[in-house]
Amino acid sequence: MFIRIVLIPLVLSCSVGLARADWIMLRGASSGDFTVYIDPSTHRIDKKTGLVKMLILYDLKTVPTRFQAPYLSMMGHEQYDCKEEQSRALTTAFFNGHMAKGKVVLNSSAEGAWHTVAPGSANEALWTMACAIATKP
């Protein structure tokens, strides 16, 4: 009885809370092919290393043709090194619907390699935002 009354509503409320994000469109990072969003409430700074983590979302206008599974959005945690001007993916999930809705068609929890932030790229706009928030007093 305890399980039905307490645990089931608790589990359901936690899973609904995790699925919800307060997405803000990141200007300067979008293109004709996709729009980039961030969830500033997920912004985390590692005090020891200075590395910054943030949840991001790419919402695509059309389905990419050169991918193993069709998807319309991609959501994941990214990590930014503000000193070395690098970034990497920590987790990524690909969805068959817009704005991280629908089914997950591919999921990766493998940490990606560090990549230099390319000038003028969407990643540069994300890195700039992550590092700007990290340096606020």
Image: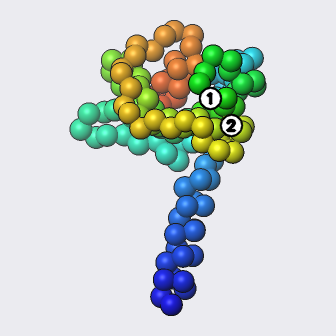
Which residue is rendered at x = 72% and y = 19% of the image? Answer: 33
Query: Cβ–Cβ below 8 Å for labels 2 and 1?
Result: yes
Q: x%, y% of residue 125? A: 55, 21
What is the crowding at mark 1: few (fewer than 14 residues within 10 Å), some, or many (at least 20)? some
From the viewer's side, name the closer residue of 104 and 38: 104
Q: Quadrant of residue 65?
A: top right
Q: Which residue is mark 2?
A: 96
Q: Is residue 53 visible?
A: no
Local secondary structure at mark 2: loop
From the viewer's side, name the closer residue of 9 and 26: 9
Label 2 to label 1: alpha-carbon separation: 9 Å
Tell me which label, 2 or 1, sits earlier in the chain: 1
Residue extending furthest toward the top: 119
Residue extending furthest toward the bottom: 1
Q: Quadrant of the C terminus?
A: top left
Question: Which amino acid is tagged 1?
Answer: Ala
Residue 22 horizontal side relative to residue 130, left or right? right
Q: x%, y% of residue 18? A: 55, 55
What is the crowding at mark 2: few (fewer than 14 residues within 10 Å), some, or many (at least 20)? some
Please tell me the numbered disc located at residue 135. none
Question: Which amino acid is tagged 2?
Answer: Asn
Disc tally is 2
Residue extending furthest toward the front: 68
| Circle nearer the viewer, 2 or 1 | 1
Q: Quadrant of residue 78?
A: top left
Q: Which residue is mark 1?
A: 69
Local secondary structure at mark 1: loop
